[in-house]
Image (cartoon, grey):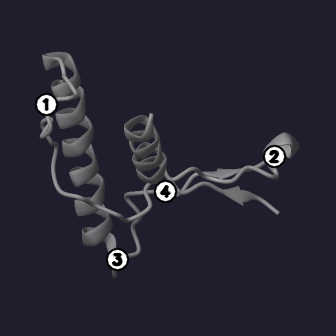
Amino acid sequence: SPVSRVVYNGKRSGGPRSPGSGSEIFTPAHEENVRFIYEAWQCVERDLRSQMGSERSLVEEYVEKMPNPSLKAFKPVDLGDLKRRNTQDAKKS
């Protein structure tokens, strides 16, 4: 059966953020990239909301026609959890 890939998990922590702790330094190019992606995603969400109830689909879900067998055991990684664990490990050492 075709494999469906979900790009966004629905969790949202707000808009683009600047570093709060001072330990991370974001360049202007990084901030611009984050702003671009955030604004583009807002357009996708708006299109999804506007198409509910209409037959014309503005957004399509990507589905692999020939799934890669080597990815069968792939498990998504929670990047937020990974970052928290790495931060805690760094504080322990």
Which quadrant of the structure image shows residue 56?
A: bottom left
CA separation in Å, label 2 and label 1? 45 Å
Q: Is 18 in front, or is 53?
A: 18
Front tag of 1 and 3: 1
In front here: 9 or 21? 21
Instruction: Place residue 87 in its image quadrant.
Output: top left
Q: Earlier in the sequence, mark 3 or mark 4?
A: 3
- Secondary-structure class at tag 2: loop
Q: Taking 30 as reference, is 60 left or right?
A: right
- Residue labelled with disc 4: 60
The residue that appears at 40% across and 49% down in the rendered structure is: 84
Q: Residues within 10 Å of mark 4 (few under 14, many from 20)?
A: few
Q: Which residue is mark 3?
A: 54
Q: Secondary structure at mark 1?
A: loop
Question: What whole-number distance in Å separates the C-alpha atoms at marks 2 and 3?
Answer: 30 Å
Q: Which residue is mark 1?
A: 22
Identified by mark 1, the residue type is: Gly
Instruction: Work out whether mark 4 precedes mark 1 in sequence or the reverse, and give the earlier one.
Output: 1
- Observer-side mark, 4 or 1, equals 1
> In the rendered image, which residue does mark 2 sit on?
66
Instruction: Estimate the spatial distance between the alpha carbons at disc 1 and disc 3, rounded to whole Å.
Output: 46 Å
- Please, what is the three-letter code of the amino acid marked with disc 3? Ser
How far from the left and from the top, in percent, is residue 20? 12, 40
Q: Callout 2, which amino acid?
A: Met
Could you tell me how far apart the alpha carbons at marks 4 and 2 are, in whole angstroms?
18 Å
**Disc 4/disc 1 C-alpha distance (Å):** 39 Å
Q: Residue at x 60, y 54 (%)?
A: 5
